[in-house]
Image: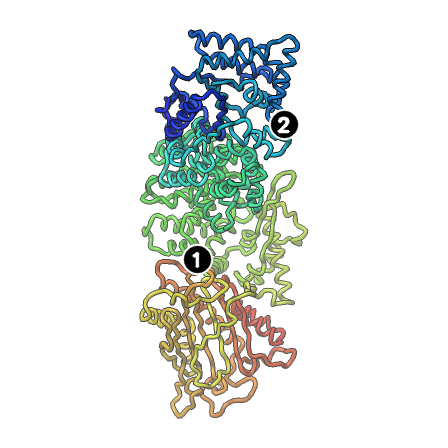
Amino acid sequence: MVVSGLPDDSWWVDDPIDEPGEDLFGRGPFVSRAVALLDQIGSRPSSTVVGLVGPWGSGKTSTIRMIVAGLNPDRWGVTWINPWALSGPDAVVTELLGAIRAAVPEKSSAGTRVRQQLSRYGALATPALSMVPVVGSAATAMANEAIQRLTDQGTTLGEQAEQVRNALHALARPTLVVIDDVDRLQPDQLLAVFRAVRVLGRLPHVHYVLAYDQETILDVLSTTPIADKHGARAVAFLEKIVTLRLEQPPVRLEHAESLFNTGCAGALSRASASLSEDAQRRMVEEREALLLRVLTEPRSVARLLTQVDIYLPLVGAAEVDVVDFITLTFLRITYPRLYQAIAMHRSALVDTTDLADLRAEFDEAVLARLDVPAPHTRRVADALQRLFPRLTTDPVRSTVAQHRRRGQRRVSDPDYTERYFALTSITGEISDDSLARAIRELAEGRHGTAAEDLTLALRPDLTDAQACARAARTLRRAASLSAELSGSEAAAVIPYVFDQFDHLRGPAAGGFGPDEEATVWLAALLQRADGGPVPATAPSDPGLLPYLLNAIRMAVPEPADATIARLAAQPPGSSWLADVVQATYRAAWARVQEHTRLGDTAPIEPVSLYVSRLESAFGDADVDRRITAAVTGGLPIADLAARLVDTEVVFASAGPHACIGDFDAAAFLRRIGRHRVSAVRTHLDSAAAGSRPGALDRTDVSWANRRRFAAGILIEALDAATAEPGRLLPTPPEEQRHPFTNHRPSLMNDGGEPLDLTLQVAVLLPAGDETPTGAHNGWGPPVSTREEILLAAMRSAPISGWLRARHSDWGIAAEPWTISDAGGRHYTTAQSGARAATPGALGMRQAFPVRAGAQLITGHAAQSPNQQSLLLTVGIGFHLAELDKQHRPAEARARSVPLPAAFTLHGLFELTDVLVRCARTASMLWTKLDDQSPPPETALLHLSLTTAEGLAAVVDLNTYSRRGTAVRGQYSKVYQYRSRPRDIAAAALRDWLSEAGYRHHEQAILDMWDPAP
């Protein structure tokens, strides 16, 4: 079989070879042995039937041709019968005897006699064929009976048969009758051939070679009365027919590999394809793991390469991943039903937002039902996972693989999937080659033909969902292709992208236009850009500002907020991207104020997005400070509130439309301050215009209607807060399941004297289900450096500032921080405190009434050994019973409740706030210990209070009513550290007092948390 080495204009040829020199599979020794066997068979007159057995496409015809070429033509007569040409069972004898006659030499007298006798014999034998059984003891008797019946009717079949035998004996020349493709016959034709060969054609010196695939032959025989669906009977029958079985040597792996490599190289060359190093590696993987394990025959290899040769140029070798294309082509032609299932599910197979579990649709049991043979189901299932990562059992691996493949033209990339199934170029979609040329023109400052084609592709009808989808795919592909640009080239393309947004935003059939994909392209360019002018277009154009803010967030390394904050804090001119960030975020804050002052006449614009981005980059406290200053400077509160009203898109039968969503009045009051909002109550009443928020038309998203809505919500919140002040207190997110249950470090050396009050905070970075383990002895610098870092951090920690501030009002002096315990790079403990400044003979508790401690633990999570984690615990304890009302050493230990030195509620709030702010110390420690990675964005904060005699002893709570008299000594809360420290302190204090049974304390905490200006 020819599959390679042919001129380019004959690659589809499937002809057998004729000469041993054309053999590609090393079958020469087998052919030589077969020739020797036939010569041995031909030396005897007994008719022999040889079966050459091999799968379809294994090259049996080529093998027979090489065998025939090895026979001596002066000795052998060879003839071929094409069973495809048989019109029916009756034609078998005529064809068979005619083939034998054609192999007899014409010029000898003996040959002439044989030819004549065969002609007469054929005329009489054909009617007898249907009366002859194929095998069994009755075959000879029935044949003789049939001949006798014909003789009784005046025929001379018996005499003619004997004359044919005598003539062949006289000729004494072996004849080989080759019957190829026997397995392609219909059941009645197959039985007719076997009858003819077994009985009427068994003549002296006449031998047969039957070529067939045994599995197919047995399947056909099982449908006939001879086997009657019994496999063993079909095998026994075939053994009666075939005297000598020869097995076609299989194609060895190295030969199949050479065949595939040569043919594949030719197909790829004709398609002008190229393979990267990664693609070459994957090609070898698919070849070894799948293709050549299934395509074991030359014809099947040629069949695959032919399909690649036809369709790869149509699709475009530069428009797909060649390895994925070849693999999917293999599945298409080898397992048609499986390919249909893949095609039907192709959207879900590549959609990372689709939560459906498709693994059950393509497991091995399903593959078997889709006609994938059992020996191949595991290989095919593995290949499907390589094509479509969503089918892998590891969701993390699936997500990572899917993300990495974007822009690589893989079949799992939604922007390229359709190309694999269209089998031709997609009408209306710009090719990658044209897209790359357009980007090159833009990078060089030219607007040539390719750039014009790109611009045309980015002008979709925004009401046509398919047109928008094509434009979106083009934009995502442009983002991937822009990775090859230099910094200055990327900067040169950015203005072009800005120009496209006006033509891409707007509602489409699915909700919105492809402007978000243009943001992806802009982000890719921002990642690469450098050395060009900072784009001033977007900050000065309010319509482009949202896109630039989102693109910056996509472009910077994670964690994005921390990176943006760092870039915003750099000196001007530090880097191109830093200058872009600073200009954009300045523009965002300026736009918030300008848009608010425009009031109801301002254009519809996502001002809340600007505020959110500013909060993410600079923190809530910074943005609150800016807003407070702006409000103090006259920024209208009602109009500002209108900008923070959420809107949402409703998908209705009449089409998508925007409507007013919600407004968080409590958050707004916390941000602005309820006192400032209460001061403009008259203005809010006017803005609400007597309308209740629930009665407004929420489909009206004008600024006037949003202002009415926000004003009404604020009025309701202020009225409710008067009756229930606790409703305005913050509610930071709590964590019910946490790893702090058994975390009880020994922080403070109390000299065996129990403390009256202890406050402690533990900060875990990143947030997780377990504290750091010491399995790898921690991480970070050497022990001595680690200790210096901890001491320096604690000297500047908020708790140290609080201790120093107590010198004037408590008369105590802060002690320096010292290392008290160390365990390598796993844990380090430091202690501090404050001593009484009053001279004289004092007891231990009087002399050292305040103690402080800190413990730093670094390590790794047991469940994630590669994940660094850090746990900082800071605590402070007091011997309050040893102090008088002025917090000086008392003459005697106090026994009253509350103690004379008890904290006021405000004092406890301030101290709790100080401890919570030590979470920032934990982040600073992470940065000092590992300057290669930024601190995690997530953290858990465990805040606890311990008192021996109950809260009433250590905090003056006499002004608040209480239910119950039980004394509780331990209070704790675990929060996700995403809120302001004062929010957590206020929430913890409120919860602790409520748990202790106190009532009507909310207003006091609210006044401390949100004091009047």
Going 52% across and 9% down the picture, which residue do you hit? Answer: 117
Q: How many marks?
A: 2
Depicted 796 relative to depicted 754: above or below: above
| Element on which disc 1 rests | helix
Any mark on residue 224, and which?
2
Q: Is residue 330 in view from this perspective? A: yes
Going 61% across and 62% down the picture, which residue do you hit? Answer: 718
Depicted 600 relative to depicted 71: above or below: below
**Quadrant housing the N terminus:** top left
The residue under label 2 is which amino acid type? Thr
Q: Is residue 622 left or right of residue 952?
A: left
Any mark on residue 618, and which?
1
Going 51% across and 71% down the picture, which residue do you hit? Answer: 943
The residue under label 1 is which amino acid type? Phe
Q: Position of residue 609 (x, y in %)?
A: 50, 50
Q: Position of residue 111 (x, y in %)?
A: 45, 9
Q: Position of residue 624 (x, y in %)?
A: 48, 60
Given residues 453 and 202, the one toward you in this image is: 202
